[in-house]
Image (cartoon, rainbow, N blue to C red):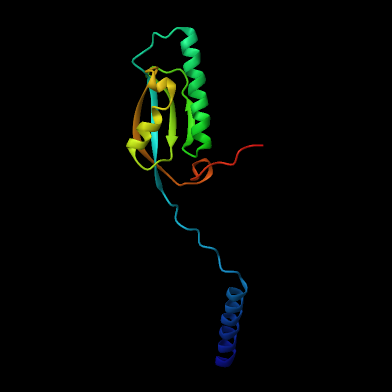
């Protein structure tokens, strides 16, 4: 009887070892790598008395600047907010090293430079994947 029990245990352990060796080792997912970006909150600026022609020109420059910053690999996220009771107008997420660099780049936007928008700039953190991947995007053909 002892030989039978020993044989059964030996057999079960052997089968289990064969199963473990036959299965490919599960890939370990690396822990997410969280990195700093810069969140820019665009708010209604101090200057609101632009005529319609000037306002249209500022928005045209605003859109062109966003396009340039995107293809330069700096602007990772952008978009307007819906109508709200706050002075919030939109947001940017920049992939730059310092707040000073983010401030300098933000002022390249004609609507910000003219005072149509004011900005708050704070550090923001995310994994650098998807639209937040570092570097320049591939241009669409």
Q: Tag count in the figure?
A: 0
Which x, y percent locates residue 27?
Answer: 54, 63
Quarter where residue 13 is shown? bottom right
7 lies left or right of 114 = right
In the foreground, 27 or 21: 27
99 lies left or right of 4 = left
Quarter where residue 19 is shown? bottom right
In the foreground, 93 or 69: 69
Which x, y percent locates residue 5?
Answer: 56, 87
Locate the C terminus and report the quarter of the image it occupies. Answer: top right
Which x, y percent locates residue 25?
Answer: 56, 68
In the foreground, 31 or 112: 112
Quarter where residue 126 is shown? top left
**Looking at this rendering, what residue extends furthest in the right direction?**
141
Which x, y percent locates residue 118?
Answer: 36, 22
Q: Residue at x 55, y 88 (%)?
A: 6
Locate the N terminus and report the quarter of the image it occupies. Answer: bottom right
138 lies left or right of 104 = right
Give the vertical position of 134 relative to 39 (above or below). below
């Amino acid at each position: 009887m002892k030989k039978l029990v020993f044989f059964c245990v030996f057999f079960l352990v052997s089968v289990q070892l064969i199963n473990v060796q036959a299965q490919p080792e599960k890939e370990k997912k690396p822990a997410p790598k969280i990195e700093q970006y810069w969140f820019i909150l665009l708010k209604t600026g101090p200057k609101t008395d632009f005529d319609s022609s000037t306002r249209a020109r500022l928005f045209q420059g605003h859109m062109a600047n966003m396009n340039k910053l995107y293809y330069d690999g700096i602007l990772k996220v952008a978009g307007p907010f819906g109508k709200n009771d706050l002075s919030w107008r939109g947001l940017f997420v920049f992939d730059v090293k310092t707040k000073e660099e983010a401030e300098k780049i933000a002022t390249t936007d004609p609507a910000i430079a003219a005072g149509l928008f004011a900005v708050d700039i704070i550090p923001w953190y995310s994994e650098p994947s998807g639209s937040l991947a570092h570097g320049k995007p591939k241009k669409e053909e």
